[in-house]
Amino acid sequence: MKYINEMTLRFKSYSANESFARSAVAAFCVQINPTLDEVIDIKTAVSEAVTNCVVHAYPTHAGMVEIWVGLTEDTAYITVSDSGIGISNPARAREPFFTTKPEQERSGMGFTVIESFMDSLELLKTTGGGTTVKMSKKLGGGLNCQSMTIQSA
Amino acid sequence: MNVQSKTINNTLYISISGELDEHTAEYARLTLDGQLHSLSHNQVIIDLNALSFMDSTGVGVLIGRYKKLKERNVPVFVCNPSPHADKIFKLTNLYEIMPRIN
């Protein structure tokens, strides 16, 4: 895959970083001219993936979260990776309303939200433990002024 | 995020503003429960007009409040969702337990 731009963010799995992470990813994606609806879809999907790291991957202590974004001319590819405890049953985790923490008023809809708001979702085991959430979304709804954006960048 | 409320004719109006996510969820729970504990209301209307962002953690917060009110037979309604909140509500069937009113 040839990307026109890429970036990586690394931060501690503190909930205070969720707003920063989703806003940073959304701002990075703006250069391929998404619609406002597409921007908020990406923010929501990133928020869900980062919440998984904060709540599930590192239940007892904060660990590092790494977000990578690769952009082609019309698609954002995003991975959110942790080195936490991993997901024992990924298929089950993706089922709507399934949660391992019902006592915490968890909706169990995180992966369902990502699946609905993005075009693709994969759950991978990170080397050495942990989880990588890999997702993508075509951002074709915006004004096509890609060449101008790149030249002025 | 911020939560404000007012009572008019036994209806509790609650306005949630800002971002409702994992970071603000606990504050939202505590604040909402503090305002919902009165037994004098016969319905609750949650105004989402100023809610700029919510994810599935926010859905969990709202379902939790709904369950507490249901024990007291107090119905909950929502109004003024953004297109984003509307999408989340539809996806998670939240309107089935807290219907949208205008």
Image (tube, grey):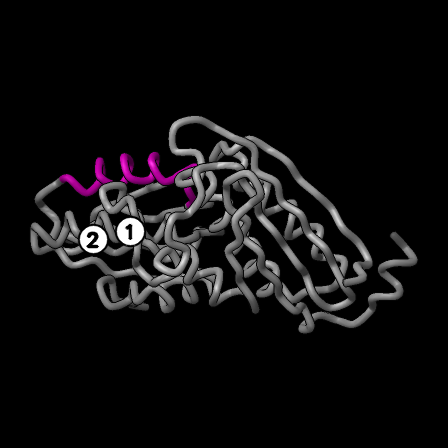
A2 w.r.t. A67: above or below: below
Image location (x, y in percent) of residue A129 = 51, 40
Residue B80 can be seen, yes or no? no
Q: On the picture, is A78 further left or further right than A55? A: right
Cβ–Cβ below 8 Å for labels 1 and 2? yes
Residue type at mark 1: give it: Leu
Q: Residues within 10 Å of mark 2 (few under 14, many from 20)?
A: many
Q: Which residue is mark 2?
A: B66
Image location (x, y in percent) of residue A141 = 67, 73
Residue farthest toward the front in the current orientation of the protein: A128
Residue farthest toward the right in the current orientation of the protein: A151
> Which quadrant is the C terminus of chain B positioned in?
bottom left
Q: Main secondary structure of the magenta part?
A: helix
Q: Residue at x 65, y 66 (%)?
A: A35
Q: Which residue is mark 1?
A: B62
In space, the residues marked 1 and 2 are separated at their CA atoms by: 6 Å
Chain of the residue under label 2: B
Image location (x, y in percent) of residue A24 = 65, 45
Residue farthest toward the top in the current orientation of the protein: A61
Q: Residues within 10 Å of mark 1 (few under 14, many from 20)?
A: many
| Front residue of A111 and B59 | A111
Q: Secondary structure at mark 2?
A: helix
Residue type at mark 2: give it: Tyr
| Front residue of B60 and A65 | A65
A75 w.r.t. B70: above or below: below
The dot on residue B21 is: none
Residue B11 can be seen, yes or no? yes
Q: Which residues are magenta?
A: B21-37
Chain of the residue under label 1: B
